[in-house]
Image: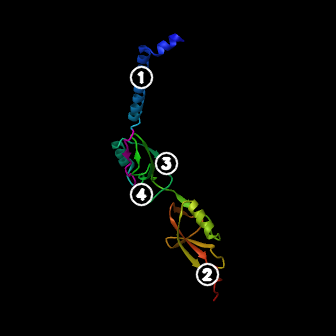
Amino acid sequence: MLHFLRFLFSRSFYWNLLLVLIGIALFLLLTFYGLSWHTRQGRFIEVPDLTAKSIAEAAIILDDKNLAYEVIDSARFNPEFLPFAVIEHLPKAGEQVKKNRKIYLTLNPANYNDVRIPDVIQVTRRSAESTLRAVGLEIGEISYLDNIGKDMVLQLRYDNAPIAPGEKLPKTSRVDLVLGNGKKPIED
């Protein structure tokens, strides 16, 4: 016990303790600054707006900013964009990301398929609208005719011409609905 107490108050113990504390401090400093350097703490790149750019233009822009990209296959055709143009991307434009971050691009398909008009005649408006949207069509104008079936689909129209169930239209076409207004037709 006496030997231990003598060592505890010796100059050699204090030197060893000082060396251990310096070693721990150096280790912590190197770890802190090394992690900060490795994770590029505080250094961000703003994501550019790639909407409506071709895939080639987007690749050049992202390469200049040291960002990677991955193309996500898209089944949604948007007629407002050219084929193979970027219709959206994640992260969105203006967000801050780090170097080499992967940007996920959704491209406009080269073309879109025609879809068959489902049979929604004598179906309620609500049901017909959801069925038409489910196949990729959009709802256009709604008009009413005297018919006892209130809000029942009497006719479908495309470009002011009647269309029959089973006909094909380009996806995203606007289909007009002619509905019954719930009034009995006036007989002559």
Distance, label 1 to label 2, CA atoms, is 92 Å
Q: Is residue 171 left or right of residue 54?
A: right
* Foreground of the two, 184 or 39: 39
- Which label's residue is closer to the chain start, 1 or 2? 1
Q: Look at mark 4 in the image and give the residue it sits on.
A: 81
Q: Secondary structure at mark 1?
A: helix
Distance, label 4 to label 3, CA atoms, is 16 Å
Report the span colored magenta: 41-51
x then y, percent, for residue 59 = 37, 45
* Foreground of the two, 37 or 94: 37
Q: Look at mark 1 in the image and give the residue it sits on.
A: 23
Q: At label 1, which amino acid type do we have?
A: Gly
Residue shown at the point (51%, 10%) measured from the top left: 3
- Residue lying at the far top of the rendered structure: 3
Q: At label 4, which amino acid type do we have?
A: Phe
- Which label's residue is closer to the chain start, 1 or 4? 1
Q: Which mark is residue 132?
A: none
* Predominant SS along the magenta part: loop
Q: At label 3, which amino acid type do we have?
A: Asp
Mark 1 vs mark 3: in front: 1
Q: Which mark is residue 146?
A: 2
* Foreground of the two, 18 or 162: 18
10 Å crowding of disc 3: few (<14), some (14-19), many (20+) = few
